[in-house]
Each structure stands twice: as structure tokens, then as C-alpha cells.
Image (cartoon, rainbow, N blue to C red):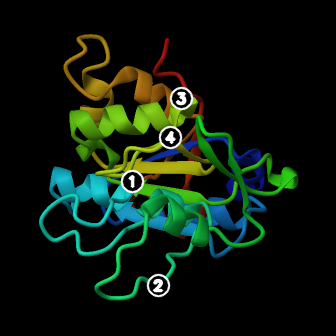
Amino acid sequence: TDIGRTVGPSLMPVLIVGETGTGKESIAREVHLTSGLPKDNFRAVNCAAFTDTLLMSELFGHVKGSFTGADSHRLGVILEAAGLIAKEQKPKTNIDFRVWLKASAGQPLQVHDDRNSIRFLGAKSTLGKSGTLFLDEVADLSKDAQAALLRFLDGNGISPIGYSGPPLIPNIRIVAATNRTDVLFGGLNSGSGFRADLLWRLAGWIIEMPALHERVLDAVGAAILRARDFKQ
């Protein structure tokens, strides 16, 4: 599609807005499949489906024993989108999280550990990016989750729950979506709503999904690419 050919290869972040059921995830997958990134390195998470603690674990991972129910190390979808595959953990054994993390990073992922950070990079042909994370219902992120996501997008990496080592810096593309534009855009001037600095980082492209009753085309064909004019 025109949107896929335009948006996909740019590797810029994408924000998709539209009502529930208008095909936002279909667009996210189209963007990923036309990006040139590894096809299997696509992960999706519904930000409204978890409590805050569980969402932080789902996104950023956790260290075994860091909270009740954390019976094993977890990568989180950000690292999974970067191409890491969780190494099997044997029951009743304690493996250092950092050792386990490196064992979970296979080829062709490049791992650079300079003691101040651990970077996970993809191929030069994709500007070092190695996958796509789709954040559905992004307007439902808590303030803490917004702050952690912004740190990651600003290049400061992630810290799984219970992890005390150097920041982990995967290089992935973010595609976000919401049906709650009132939350996302409504408080920009007052500072009472979604963080404007995070919204700025998420909306490299804005794709608007027309309501179902307004179109006759399929979801991908009906999508409208908009300019990023909310910053005016």
C-alpha cells in the first residue's frame, strides 16, 4: 500500500489513532512488514490489559525473585522485539540475569557491553534497528510507565524490575495506537494529560483510521496519513 511504502522504510515511530475495531493492529503489522526489519521481530502489547506493575514487567522484563510471582527471569516485549529469545532456565537454579541476558541474544544481534551500558543492535542496513514494538491503547499508560518509556526513547535504555546493572539499550521501532485521542491530545496545553514530550517522540508519523461507517475499503486501504500538526 502507499502508506506501507511511505511509512514502513522510514523506521520513524508511528502513532495510529482511530476507534476500536478499525484495524489499527493491521496497520502496525503492515508498517513492520514493509520496514525491512526481521519479520519475526514484531511484538504487540495492550497497555490497558495489565496492572501497572505487570505492565512494567511485560514491557521491560524482570529479574527472578524481584516480586511475588517472579519465579524466573523475563525479557519483556521490548527486548523480545529487539530479537532476543529467552534462554531456557532450569528449575531450582539461579543464573545471573546479565549472564542469562547475553545467552538470550543470538545472531545476528550485535551485543556491545562497555560497562556503562549493554547495547543490542541490528544490521547496519536497518540503521541498527532490529524489530518493532506495537503499543496498543498507549493512552492508558500510567505516569510511571510513560516516564520509563520516555527514558528509553531518549536513548537512556531500560532497567528490568529488580535489575541493578548498566542500562540495556535495544534499538527498536515503536508503533503506538489509541482510540482515546481526548486523553492523548486533550491535556497538552494544561499538562494534565498524556506527557507532551512522550507524545512528541511517539508521533513521527500519524495515521488516522476512519470510522467503520465512513469507509468501504479495507483497514489498510482506508488509512489516512496525517501531518504531525499537534505541536503547532
Query: Which label number is shown at residue 167?
Result: 4
Query: Upstream in the sequence, badge 4 or badge 1?
Result: 1
Query: Upstream in the sequence, badge 4 or badge 2?
Result: 2
Query: Upstream in the sequence, badge 2 or badge 1?
Result: 1
Query: Which label number is shown at residue 154?
Result: 3
The amino acid type found where label 4 is placed reads: Pro
Q: Between marks 3 and 1, how big is the CA–CA gap?
A: 15 Å
Which residue is located at x 52 percent, y 51 percent? Answer: 175
**x, y percentage for residue 216?**
50, 67
Q: Between marks 4 and 2, how big is the CA–CA gap?
A: 23 Å
The amino acid type found where label 2 is placed reads: Glu
Which residue is located at x 61 percent, y 51 percent? Answer: 172
Mark 4 is surrounded, within 10 Å at the Cα level, by few (under 14), some (14 to 19) or many (20 or more) other residues, namely some
Q: Nearer the viewer, mark 3 or mark 2?
A: 2
**x, y percentage for residue 154?**
53, 29
Helix, strand or loop for disc 2 = loop
**x, y percentage for residue 35?**
74, 58
The amino acid type found where label 3 is placed reads: Asp
Query: Upstream in the sequence, badge 3 or badge 2?
Result: 2
Which residue is located at x 47 percent, y 84 percent? Answer: 88
